[in-house]
Amino acid sequence: MIQRFIELGEGYGDIYELRELITSNQQRFMHGFVFISKNPQGQDVLSVAAVFKPAAEGNFMPIYMCREGIPVDSKRLDIFEQAVAEIGFTPIKMEVKHSTVYADRKFYHSHLISVLRLNHYIPPMQ
């Protein structure tokens, strides 16, 4: 199974697109995540992500993400948490390293996928 992050943006206007993906794909929704990290200036920033089950055909599990553009106690975080709560789920909060720690964004995404697999939030590699 291919598990891949799809970055929508940094959580400004794209948070509304993520909300729409969650509400229109309720039957495929698996988990919502709030990743907390410290930016290079030492401030806490948030990423939000939604994991969906693979489509009926194909072997692709998308993880849509708004990366590191959401400050703590933001209205945008409320929008995400409300969308997840409306379909009966609670977002999972995790502290992770900031993406700038990694030489390439692919390594950052691979690290997050490994963390999600180890915690049994997404299926293991097959």
Image (cartoon, helix red, strand yellow):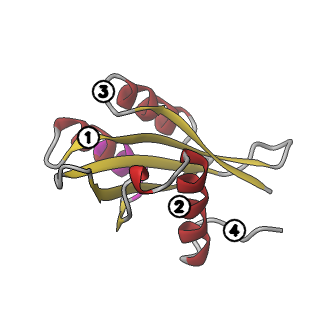
Which mark is in front, 4 or 1? Answer: 1
Query: Mark 1 or mark 2, which has the lower sequence index?
Result: 1
Q: What residue is shown with label 4? A: 123
Element class at badge 3: loop
The amino acid at mark 4 is Pro
**Front-lying residue, 110 or 90:** 110
Q: Residue at x 37, y 33 (%)?
A: 10
Numbered badge on residue 70: 1
The amino acid at mark 2 is Leu
- The x, y position of residue 48, in whole percent, is 38, 47
The question of residue 86 being in magenta is answered with yes
Query: Mark 4 or mark 1, which has the lower sequence index?
Result: 1
Which residue reaches farthest front? 103
In contact (CB < 8 Å): disc 1 and disc 2: no
Numbered badge on residue 16: none
In contact (CB < 8 Å): disc 3 and disc 4: no
Q: What residue is shown with label 3? A: 12
The amino acid at mark 3 is Tyr
